[in-house]
């Protein structure tokens, strides 16, 4: 692409009053050799946009560099189409709003920002959208319970063909076992008739839904828009071409036999909530020995919120027990109902059901269960400790005890799977990436992925996703989790969740058809190019990719799947040979930005700090610091990166060898409650950073010159302390000895 660059310097928002615009123009025209350079007080206004468009149409400008506000604002205004390269220089939020006006250091900061953006623009090439073969827009829903039926119906109602696969002979899942369901409409004070039959009838009648019952997924291969799915049914193998997948296989009750203290398996009159539903469906609630139930005790959190069993709350247990309490009261209003709980959780309108059970005489005991024993008449005595008073509680013999066992996602059931990095000579090595989420062979999706047959899971077995920003998205692009396989939830939440997952599945297949990335870089048409002639088959890209986007061919070479790729660049940062790059993001591009920084001589006593800042959390935090006019030193030079996981160690060497005094990596928080938009990127950056000591030793530099800090968007108020504290440490170390060379 023959580039003609136009630089447009906005003077509004106090930029013109705080900076020497003439000096910036000189940088653009003299140093950057931009043939077009203009200034305007309001480039985001109609007149300013018209001026830029006129230059594009009449002057042949095809590379536009706008120096003004942050790229996080006015992105819709500065959209000049796919044939124009656009680069934004943040003079407002990150320079003039957090540094003194008409100051030499502030001016130098602005000029360096323009130099870096020009260097980037000169290196960027227009990406060409990837077009797959035989791409389809059909949705696969795995699991035919409430969530699966809802997802299939919502997808079909939106105009997309849907394939629904259920392993049982009939649809309905858990809902089929219920006598009644928790209230979903006003007045919310009494259970309702189970409506799953009507939902089944609706999905079976829909012309755009193809249903397989008594079937399982044998294999899923391919990528979004191009999944090849093998389905096993009645001994036959059927195939479907699929665009995206919704996993809605639900959860199962926690195994009650593990709760010895609560008497299950020891006393026949201790049953589970599931067995209670079966008793109610028979018409009259009686004990297993046939005696009519006159008193009943519900034990909440039976295995849930327990470090020995399920550490999490299972969400529905309280409401289900309240619902079942009404069963006995309907049968015998004089019956005694006890509910032992740690606390009652009835979110939303379920509070009305709680109040009704109280009015009907339900006795609520907030206590820790010490044990359950049986008297001579097979009645059960519950011993507990009152949480509020610390006193002991012992019930008179009750006829029946119901354990509200927690829920375990189906993704948590299976055998452990360990990824190995097999080399060409057949040897196996441990994975390069440390601390990744576990993968189980749970026979749900049977993915033909090099990274494993199922999705990575969280420590409790739920499908891993970005729980803050992208709750439905799993670690496998194009596969979305919905319902209780994603998190513990009730029927209403499952319906909402399945609808959301179906909408995300639709978004995925539409974006994939355009060649665009999905979350979080929606609209990005780039994808990684591999210079295979230099590949050493080290396996780092295949193992470290958080999303399973790279398989391997028969020669152990990386085999990228562009529609699986989320364009984070983690593979680029992982590659020691630097064979992976994007047309608009590469190791040399960032290297050119580093080289563009003007480093003062040592005697000027103007240190320089390069910040590699994650575009998802760190860049917004820096912008927020500017919006709040928080002041920090003007020594920093910010280089946005897609993810800290894309960081190449070459950038560290390039930066320090240029004479830059220090390097600060600002990235998302990682760990159990990670906020990294690319899940593992920030953690990988820290792992790589721990290995730079060799590089620093080779350059005869102190390790303190390179530091990483984890920040969230809301940590903007900490930015000045982080930057100034690092600058103070660099002053203690003294100038980089490479300065001036």
Image: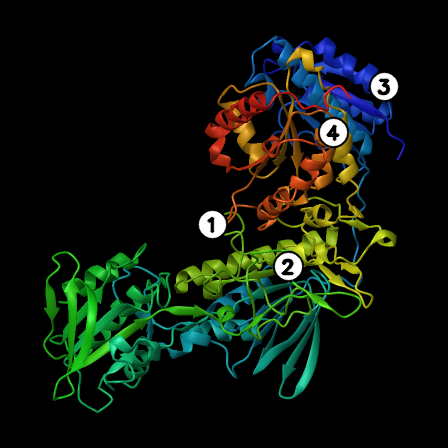
Label 2 sits on a secondary structure element that is loop
Q: Are marks 1 and 2 in contact (CB under 8 Å)?
A: no
What mark, if any, has residue 35 been given in the picture? 3
- Callout 1 secondary element: loop
Please tell me which of labels 4 and 1 falls first in the chain. 4
Badge number at residue 478: 2
Q: Position of residue 166 (x, y in %)?
A: 55, 77
Percent x, y of residue 634: 60, 18
Q: Residue at x 37, y 62 (%)?
A: 311
Residue behind mark 1: 673
Q: Give the mark nearer the N terminus: 4 vs 3.
A: 3
Depth check, mark 1 against mark 2: the one in front is: 1
Q: CA distance from mark 2 to mark 4?
A: 42 Å
Q: Is residue 550 left or right of residue 374?
A: right
* Residue 384 visible: yes
The crowding category of the residue bearing disc 1, from other C-alpha atoms within 10 Å (few below 14, some 14 to 19, many at least 20), is few
Relative image position of residue 602 (x, y in whole percent): 69, 15
């Amino acid at each position: 692409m023959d580039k003609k660059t136009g630089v447009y310097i906005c003077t509004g928002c106090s930029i013109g009053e705080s900076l020497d615009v003439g000096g910036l123009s000189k940088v653009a025209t003299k140093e950057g050799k931009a043939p077009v350079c203009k200034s305007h007080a309001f480039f985001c206004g109609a007149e300013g946009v018209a001026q830029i468009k006129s230059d594009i149409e009449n002057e042949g400008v095809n590379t536009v560099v706008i120096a003004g506000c942050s790229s996080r604002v006015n992105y819709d205004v500065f959209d000049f189409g796919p044939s124009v390269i656009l680069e934004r220089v943040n003079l407002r939020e990150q320079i003039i709003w957090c540094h003194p006006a008409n100051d030499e250091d502030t001016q130098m900061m602005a000029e360096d920002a323009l130099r870096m953006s020009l260097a980037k623009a000169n290196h960027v090439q227009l990406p060409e959208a990837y077009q797959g073969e035989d791409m389809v827009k059909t949705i696969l829903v795995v699991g035919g319970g409430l969530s699966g039926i809802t997802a299939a119906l919502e997808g079909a109602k939106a105009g997309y063909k849907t394939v629904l696969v259920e392993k049982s002979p009939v649809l309905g899942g858990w809902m089929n076992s219920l006598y009644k369901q928790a209230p979903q409409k006003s007045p919310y004070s009494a259970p309702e008739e189970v409506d799953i039959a009507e939902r089944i009838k609706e999905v079976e009648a829909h012309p755009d839904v193809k249903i397989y019952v008594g079937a399982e997924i044998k294999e899923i291969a391919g990528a979004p828009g191009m999944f090849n799915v093998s389905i096993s049914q009645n001994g036959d193998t059927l195939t479907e071409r699929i665009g995206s997948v919704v996993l809605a296989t639900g959860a199962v009750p926690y195994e009650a036999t593990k709760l010895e203290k609560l008497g299950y398996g020891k006393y026949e009159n201790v049953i589970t909530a599931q067995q209670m539903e079966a008793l109610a469906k028979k018409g009259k609630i009686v004990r297993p020995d046939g005696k009519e139930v006159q008193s009943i005790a519900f034990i909440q959190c039976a295995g849930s919120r327990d470090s020995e069993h399920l550490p999490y709350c299972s969400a529905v247990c309280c409401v289900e027990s309240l619902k079942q309490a009404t069963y006995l009261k309907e049968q015998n209003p004089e019956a005694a109902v006890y509910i032992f709980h740690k606390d009652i959780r009835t979110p939303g309108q379920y509070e009305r059901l709680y109040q009704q059970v109280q009015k009907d005489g339900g006795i609520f005991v907030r206590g820790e269960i010490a044990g359950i024993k049986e008297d001579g008449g097979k009645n059960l005595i519950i011993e507990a400790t009152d949480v509020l008073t610390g006193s002991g509680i012992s019930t008179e013999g009750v006829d029946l005890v119901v354990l509200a066992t927690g829920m375990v996602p189906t993704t948590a059931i299976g055998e452990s799977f360990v990824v190995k990095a097999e080399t060409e000579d057949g040897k196996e090595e441990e994975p390069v990436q440390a601390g990744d989420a576990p993968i189980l062979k749970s026979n749900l999706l049977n993915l033909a992925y090099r990274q494993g047959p199922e999705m990575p899971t969280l420590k409790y077995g739920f499908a891993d996703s970005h729980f803050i920003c992208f709750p439905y998205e799993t670690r496998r692009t194009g596969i979305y989790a919905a319902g209780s396989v994603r998190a513990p939830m009730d029927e209403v939440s499952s319906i909402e969740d399945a609808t959301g997952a179906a909408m995300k599945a639709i978004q995925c297949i539409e974006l994939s058809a355009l060649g665009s990335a999905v979350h979080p870089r929606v609209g990005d048409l780039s994808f990684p190019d591999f210079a295979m002639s230099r590949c050493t088959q080290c396996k780092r890209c295949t193992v470290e990719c958080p999303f399973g986007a790279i398989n391997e061919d028969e020669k152990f070479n990386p085999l990228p799947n562009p529609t699986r790729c989320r364009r984070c660049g983690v593979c680029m940062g992982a590659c020691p040979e630097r064979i992976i790059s994007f047309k608009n993001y590469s190791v040399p591009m960032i290297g050119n930005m580093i080289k563009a920084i003007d480093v003062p001589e040592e005697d000027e006593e103007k240190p320089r700090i390069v910040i590699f800042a994650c575009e998802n959390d760190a860049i917004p935090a820096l912008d927020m610091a500017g919006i709040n006019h928080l002041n920090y030193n003007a020594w920093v030079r910010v280089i946005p990166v897609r993810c800290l996981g894309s960081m190449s160690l070459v950038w560290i060497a390039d930066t320090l060898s240029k004479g830059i005094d220090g390097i600060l990596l600002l990235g998302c928080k990682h760990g159990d409650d990670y906020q990294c938009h690319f899940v593992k990127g920030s953690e990988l950056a820290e792992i790589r950073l721990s290995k730079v000591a060799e590089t620093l030793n080779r350059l005869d530099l102190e390790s303190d010159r390179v530091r990483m800090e984890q920040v969230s968007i809301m940590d903007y108020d900490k930015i000045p302390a982080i930057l100034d504290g690092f600058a103070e440490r660099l002053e203690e170390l003294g100038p980089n000895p490479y300065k001036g060379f």
